[in-house]
């Protein structure tokens, strides 16, 4: 007889199969049931007219440029997985965008993948920069600050170098065509040793021309080494990936294009470059090794256990809150019941039924008429108010108690 499997074994097998069969993907849907408990993790549902998909986004994954609200159309990137404690599949979200911005991001990633698959970003096809260029071509706006910065740096570092400007618009609908044509013109002329292509900083929309396929292909097809200088240190454009060298600013590109005239600085520059290249190779090798470890199921399993325990902790926190609230409600109900019972046994309750408290002038309470004498003053306390009385007569009570009654006069 085949050995029976435990529930955990079955769930883990389903989880592994699901994650292997479905690589990270993009999902478009309407955001519903969004919640973010004190742990910082986010739980929500993506839905359309026919189906819904439960999602989790760990607090280590930032959400930028988006304030999630129910009913919002969003685009999420993530991977299908299984929350083993419940045996439910869910979508582990890596990135979350508004639907419109998300579509632009997808288009960018698709173009990036397409060009990478064609080898346009491969390092082995890139040219080395000449050590001592005699002529430097620049493709940028003639009126922009980028060209002035390049001129200032080149004159300071190597005053004898020749500078050739090929003007081009760097933003707007016609910018990609003009940049690509400028690169082609300087290649056809053949009188420059290195090209600087770029502009000053700006918004993502301002830098759109340097993510255009036409510009990227022109850079990749250039026989002249190209330094990209888009001027946006945070985001890397497709032009940066295709260029032989990327510089964060136009000024930095000019510094990369020529060496300083001082021999000591040349030597320091060479040593710095060698150290940087050696460190980069070491980082790349270790990054590949780390990536291979991260892609293994065992490493993902460890990370997933941490994530699932975090989700379970949120559930325990919710259960503890409900249990504490129920306990407090029960104790409050007991308090109200006992308070009511205590009130019904108190003296005020007796007075409300028509009885009174009779006291002599010395404050003692009278419970027997035989202790009274005629003309004695008494006070009678009622539920509401008090009366001062005088004993008119003390009479014998003819009931079975054999007690006496006192007749009072107010």
Image (cartoon, helix red, strand yellow):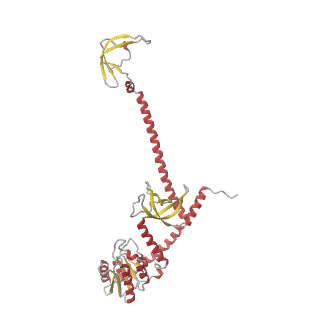
Specify the quadrant that holds the C terminus: top left
Quarter holding the N terminus is bottom right
Q: Quarter of the image holding residue 108?
A: bottom left
Image: 223 above or below 395: below
Give x and y (percent) for residue 385.
31, 24
Q: Is residue 14 above or below residue 252?
A: above
| Residue sitting nearer the eye, 264 or 377 | 377
Give the answer, above or below, for where 71 lies relative to 273. Answer: above
Q: Nearer the viewer, residue 39 or 182?
A: 182
The image position of residue 186, as x and y in percent, is: 37, 87
**Residue located at (32% from left, 78% from top):** 146
Tally the numbered discs.
0
Query: Residue 136: percent from the left, percent from the top?
Result: 35, 85
Looking at the image, which residue sits at the far front? 49
Regarding residue 132, the answer to whether it shows in the image is no
Q: Position of residue 79 (x, y in %)?
A: 51, 64
- Relative to 1, is 231 on the left or the right? left
Residue that sits furthest to the right in the current view = 1
Q: Is residue 301 visible?
A: yes
Q: Quadrant of residue 20?
A: bottom right
């Amino acid at each position: 007889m085949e050995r029976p499997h435990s529930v955990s074994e079955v769930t883990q097998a389903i989880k592994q199969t699901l994650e292997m069969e479905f690589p990270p993907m993009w999902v478009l849907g309407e955001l519903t049931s969004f919640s973010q408990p004190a742990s910082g993790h986010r739980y929500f549902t993506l839905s359309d007219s026919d189906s819904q998909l439960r999602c989790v986004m760990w607090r280590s994954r930032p959400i930028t440029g988006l304030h999630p609200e129910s009913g919002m159309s969003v685009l999420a990137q993530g991977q299908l997985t299984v929350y083993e404690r419940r045996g439910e599949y869910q979508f582990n979200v890596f990135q979350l965008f508004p639907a419109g911005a998300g579509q632009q991001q997808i288009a960018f990633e698709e173009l990036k993948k397409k060009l990478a698959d064609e080898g346009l970003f491969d390092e082995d096809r890139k040219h080395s920069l000449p050590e001592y260029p005699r002529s430097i071509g620049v493709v940028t706006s003639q009126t922009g600050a980028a060209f002035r910065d390049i001129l200032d740096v080149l004159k300071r570092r190597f005053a004898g170098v020749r500078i050739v400007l090929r003007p081009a618009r760097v933003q707007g609908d016609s910018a990609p065509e003009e940049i690509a044509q400028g690169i082609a013109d300087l290649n056809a002329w053949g009188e420059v040793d290195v090209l600087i292509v770029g502009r000053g900083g700006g918004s993502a929309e301002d830098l759109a021309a340097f993510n255009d396929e036409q510009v990227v292909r022109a850079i990749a097809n250039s026989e002249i080494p190209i330094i990209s200088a888009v001027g946006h240190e945070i985001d890397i454009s497709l032009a940066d990936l295709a260029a032989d060298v990327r510089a964060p600013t136009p000024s930095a590109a000019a510094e990369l294009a020529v060496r300083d005239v001082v021999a000591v600085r040349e030597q320091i520059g060479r040593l710095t470059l060698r150290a940087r290249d050696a460190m980069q190779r070491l980082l790349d090798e270790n990054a590949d090794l780390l990536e291979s470890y991260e892609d293994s199921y065992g490493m993902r399993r460890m990370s997933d256990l941490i994530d699932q325990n975090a989700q379970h902790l949120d559930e325990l926190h919710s259960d503890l809150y409900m249990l504490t609230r129920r306990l407090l409600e029960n104790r409050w109900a007991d308090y109200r019941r006992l308070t009511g019972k205590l009130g019904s046994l108190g003296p005020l309750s007796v007075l409300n039924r028509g009885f009174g408290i009779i006291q002599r002038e010395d404050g003692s309470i009278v419970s027997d008429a035989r202790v009274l004498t005629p003309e004695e003053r008494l006070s009678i306390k009622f539920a509401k108010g008090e009366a001062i009385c005088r004993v008119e007569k003390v009479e014998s009570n003819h009931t079975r108690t054999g007690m006496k009654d006192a007749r009072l006069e107010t």
